[in-house]
Structure formats: structure tokens, C-alpha cells
């Protein structure tokens, strides 16, 4: 019997862990993000310097400081401290860690102390009429220590702990992803808000210039130099410019509200000092992480990997649920009619119980539970693959946008410079009476369009840099 107990104990202590053992997915074998090699440099334009793309360079933490604007740094820090999405992700992380600790605690023995006191009056039908009937009215005190220990023979509990810890790890990466997204969205929102203010200023300047031209044309009309058609055409141009202003003001208000929400502020509360587009600088170099590095630094990919790990452990837990389970329990205590006598003489008691349970029939629930876990594992694999492909696509889009928007900015700068020069010549000639109003009207409309396009092109160049940093997994933590 002793030998059998020893062998049984050794078997229990060396219990296996069923289910698949998780191994991180292999690093991607691809070397780039686009079929054609990306450019190694973004050319300079008349208004902005060029940038060098460095393959394999380390991704800087707090990447938004590369724009060299203290006001922008302050806005991002405020967003990271008060954004509600980050607060939700942080609460989810704390919840996941607490749940993981709860599951881990189930592997340890469970002990409970119990004390009961009762007052009992026995039935007269059971009493001896010759004895004192008062002995059938008594108090009973019971103190018990109960200990239970479920032996994790097939590792079902270990798999549940593994799954819970992997889920907590996924929540940690989601928090990191939320911080990165909030930082990037704050940068882009600040850039767009600054661009809208520039476009409003340009539109107001155009309206002012159009009013001046209209006043000049009316002088010429009074002198009989032009007809009513010229006046009507200029009035239409002025009205069109004035009509475009409310839409820009509306867009600026919307952007300011969005920025307030990112900062965790009431939209009715005044915004802190915002930035000016001309005060931003482009970083001289931009990192381009290798694909094998990208999957290790993108928090959404890491979260998908941790979820894959949790799904793998859930399969093991579902398999273990179909196998025998062993539980050991023990209790010890004392019982007496007086509190101080519970552990005297023969009043103490104890018991040791061991039990084994083998599921026989559960209506297919356990088998279907395993099938559901296996299906969830397949889904987690597909989600991880989708996260990797999405990360690669984000980097490819950012690299393409950098090159294309640099060319667009150069064209916008040339167009705006030419339109401004042409409008200046025509305005001067108009004052001398050497040009018709139609040419001036066309030049004015073109100038408004090129000025607005130039602001959009400059804003896009800065937003593209933010998009690249975010696509590479830009961290909001100084230590990463």
C-alpha cells in the first residue's frame, strides 16, 4: 500500500500538461513593404527640407518631439495624461491582471476557517423523566479548518493561468497601442487645425483683395471705362470667396472639438495654445524598420500574438476538462457544549478525503467546448496574420505618401508662386487700365485655389511623417 501511494504521488507530481504548447509565430521572411524598392530620400522643396530614409534605424521614443515644437509636445503630453481611450485601456489592463492573479490563485490549496454556535432544546419525548430535563437545553460550539486542493493532473489549471496571463499581456499591448494612436491623432489634429487657420486667413485676405478690386472696378465703371458685366463678374467672385469662408470656419470648429476630446477636455473649455504650421520642422532622417523588427514593435501585432497565445492555452484547458480530475480535502476542528472545551479530551475531530472524477456524459458539451476553443485558435491565427498584413500595408502607404506628397508640395509651391506673380502683374495693369477684368477674375480665382492647395500640401507632409511613425509602432514611452 505504501509503495502504491508513493507511485501515485510521483505520478501526480509529474502530471502532464495537455494541449498545444505555444510557440511565437516565425518572423516574416519579406525584406520590404512594396514590390519596388522605396526611395532612400524624400527630396527637398522650396519651403521644406528633404529627408533621408534609413532602413533598420531605431524608432525614437516620443517621436513627435522630432518636429521641434514645444507647443506640440505639450499638447501630446496633455492627451497622454487625460485621454479617455487611454483611461479605458488602462482600466482593462488592471482588470485583466487582477483576473490573471485570481486564476493563478486557484492552483494553490484553499483554506477556510469556520465557527458555529448554536443553542439546542431537545424534545421531551427523548428525555428521561427521572433526570434533570435541563440537560437537554444546551449550547454547541464548533470550530473547523477546511482545506481543499485540486490536483492539476493534466494541466488544465496551468493552461487557464497561461491563458489569463496572455490575455493580460494582450491588454498591456492594447494600452500601448492606444497611447501611440492618441499621440499620432493629437499631432495630426493639431496640424489640421493649424492648416485650417491658415486657409481661413488666406481666404479672408482673398476676400479683402476682391473687395478692393470691386471698389476699383466701380470707380472705372463710374468713369465709363467698363460695363456692368465686369462689375457683376467681380461680385460673383467675391460672393464665392465669402461663401467658402463659413465652411472653413465650421471645419476649424469641428477640428478644435476633436482636439479637445483627444485632450480629455470639455469641448466648451478653451483650448490651450495651439501650433503654427510654419513653426514645425521636418526631421532630417526617418527610420524604416525591417519587417522582422516591425512585428516586434507594433503593439497591435503584439496584442494579436498574445491573444493567439491565450487561444492556444484555452484549447489545452478544454482538453483537460474531458479528463479525470482529482481533489484532496481535509478538515479538522473541535466541538463541545462549552467554547473552551472544543479542543479538550476527545472533542477534536478531523477527516481526510480524496476523490477522482471522470466526466462520462455531458450531452456533448465538453467535446463541443474543445471544438469551440480550436475554432477560436484558428480565428486567432487569422487575426494575427491580418494584423501583420495590416501593419505592412500601413508602412507601405506611409512610404508612398511621403514620396507622392513631396512631389505634390513641390508642384503646389510652384503653382502658388506663379499664381501670386501673375495676380500681382494683372492687378498693377488693371490699375493702369491696361488689362480687362476677366483676366483679373481668373487670376484671382486661381490664386485662391493655389494658396489653399499649398496649405493642404504642407500639412500633408507633416501628417505623413506622423503616419509613418505610427505605422512603425511609434511608442509613447520614453524607455522603449
Image: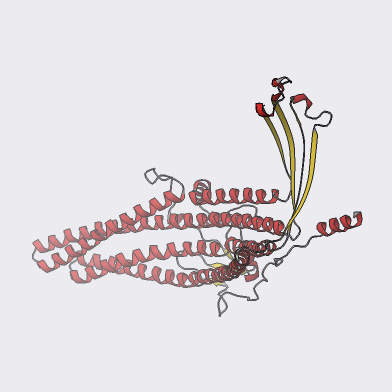
Drawn side of residue 39 relative to residue 162, left or right: left
In the rendered view of the protein, which quadrant contains the N terminus? bottom right
Drawn side of residue 380 relative to residue 343, left or right: left
Q: How many marks?
A: 0
Drawn side of residue 180 relative to residue 459, left or right: right
Which residue corresponds to the image point at 70% horizontal and 48% vertical from the top-left?
105
Drawn side of residue 142 relative to residue 446, left or right: right
Relative image position of residue 84 (x, y in whole percent): 48, 49
Residue 471 versus residue 362: which sits nearer the camera?
362
- Residue 434 visible somewhere in the drawing: no
Q: Residue furthest right?
A: 3
Relative image position of residue 287 (x, y in whole percent): 60, 65
Residue 50 versus residue 288: which sits nearer the camera?
288
Which residue corresponds to the image point at 76% horizontal and 58% vertical from the top-left?
153
Is 262 placed above or below 341 here? below
Q: Residue furthest front?
A: 130
Color theme of the render:
secondary structure
Which residue corresponds to the image point at 62% horizontal and 52% vertical from the top-left?
478
In the rendered view of the protein, which quadrant contains the C terminus? bottom right
Relative image position of residue 247 (x, y in whole percent): 29, 58
- Residue 276 visible somewhere in the drawing: yes
Q: Residue furthest bottom?
A: 35
Is 227 placed above or below 173 here? below
Residue 203 versus residue 423: which sits nearer the camera?
203
Amino acid at each position: 500500500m505504501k509503495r502504491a501511494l508513493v507511485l501515485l504521488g510521483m505520478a501526480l507530481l509529474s502530471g502532464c500538461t495537455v494541449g498545444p504548447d505555444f510557440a511565437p509565430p516565425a518572423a516574416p521572411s519579406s525584406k520590404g513593404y512594396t514590390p519596388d524598392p522605396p526611395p532612400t530620400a524624400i527630396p527637398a522643396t522650396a519651403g521644406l527640407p528633404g529627408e533621408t530614409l534609413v532602413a533598420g534605424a531605431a524608432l525614437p521614443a516620443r517621436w513627435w518631439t522630432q518636429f521641434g515644437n514645444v507647443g506640440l509636445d505639450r499638447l501630446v503630453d496633455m492627451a497622454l495624461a487625460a485621454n479617455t481611450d487611454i483611461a479605458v485601456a488602462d482600466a482593462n489592463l488592471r482588470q485583466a491582471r487582477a483576473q490573471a492573479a485570481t486564476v493563478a490563485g486557484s492552483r494553490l490549496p484553499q483554506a477556510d476557517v469556520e465557527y458555529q454556535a448554536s443553542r439546542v432544546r431537545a424534545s421531551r419525548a427523548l428525555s428521561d423523566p427521572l433526570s434533570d430535563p435541563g440537560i437537554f437545553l444546551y449550547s454547541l460550539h464548533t470550530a473547523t479548518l477546511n482545506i481543499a486542493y485540486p490536483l492539476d493532473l493534466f494541466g488544465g489549471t496551468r493552461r487557464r493561468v497561461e491563458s489569463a496571463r496572455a490575455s493580460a499581456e494582450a491588454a498591456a499591448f492594447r494600452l500601448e497601442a492606444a497611447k501611440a494612436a492618441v499621440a499620432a491623432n493629437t499631432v495630426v489634429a493639431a496640424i489640421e487645425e493649424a492648416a485650417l487657420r491658415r486657409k481661413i486667413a488666406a481666404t479672408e485676405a482673398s476676400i479683402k483683395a476682391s473687395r478692393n478690386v470691386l471698389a476699383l472696378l466701380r470707380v472705372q465703371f463710374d468713369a465709363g471705362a467698363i460695363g456692368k458685366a465686369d462689375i457683376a463678374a467681380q461680385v460673383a467672385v467675391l460672393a464665392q470667396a465669402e461663401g467658402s469662408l463659413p465652411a472653413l470656419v465650421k471645419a476649424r470648429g469641428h477640428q478644435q472639438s476633436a482636439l479637445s476630446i483627444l485632450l480629455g477636455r470639455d469641448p466648451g473649455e478653451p483650448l490651450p495654445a495651439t501650433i503654427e504650421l510654419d513653426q514645425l520642422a521636418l526631421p532630417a532622417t526617418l527610420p524604416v524598420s525591417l519587417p522582422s523588427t516591425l512585428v516586434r514593435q507594433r503593439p497591435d501585432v503584439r496584442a494579436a500574438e498574445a491573444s493567439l497565445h491565450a487561444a492556444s492555452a484555452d484549447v489545452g484547458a478544454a482538453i483537460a476538462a474531458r479528463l479525470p480530475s482529482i481533489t484532496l480535502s481535509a478538515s479538522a476542528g473541535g466541538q463541545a457544549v462549552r467554547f473552551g472545551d472544543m479542543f479538550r479530551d476527545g472533542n477534536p475531530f478531523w477527516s481526510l478525503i480524496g476523490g477522482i472524477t471522470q466526466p462520462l456524459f455531458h450531452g456533448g458539451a465538453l467535446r463541443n467546448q474543445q471544438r469551440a476553443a480550436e475554432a477560436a485558435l484558428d480565428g486567432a491565427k487569422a487575426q494575427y496574420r491580418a494584423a501583420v498584413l495590416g501593419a505592412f500595408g500601413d508602412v507601405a502607404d506611409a512610404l508612398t505618401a511621403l514620396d507622392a506628397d513631396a512631389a505634390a508640395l513641390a508642384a503646389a509651391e510652384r503653382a502658388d508662386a506663379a499664381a501670386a506673380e501673375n495676380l500681382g502683374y494683372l492687378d498693377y495693369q488693371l490699375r493702369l487700365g491696361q488689362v480687362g477684368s476677366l483676366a483679373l477674375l481668373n487670376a484671382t480665382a486661381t490664386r485662391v485655389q493655389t494658396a489653399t492647395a499649398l496649405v493642404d500640401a504642407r500639412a500633408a507632409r507633416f501628417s505623413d511623417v506622423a503616419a509613418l511613425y505610427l505605422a512603425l509602432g511609434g511608442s509613447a514611452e520614453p524607455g522603449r
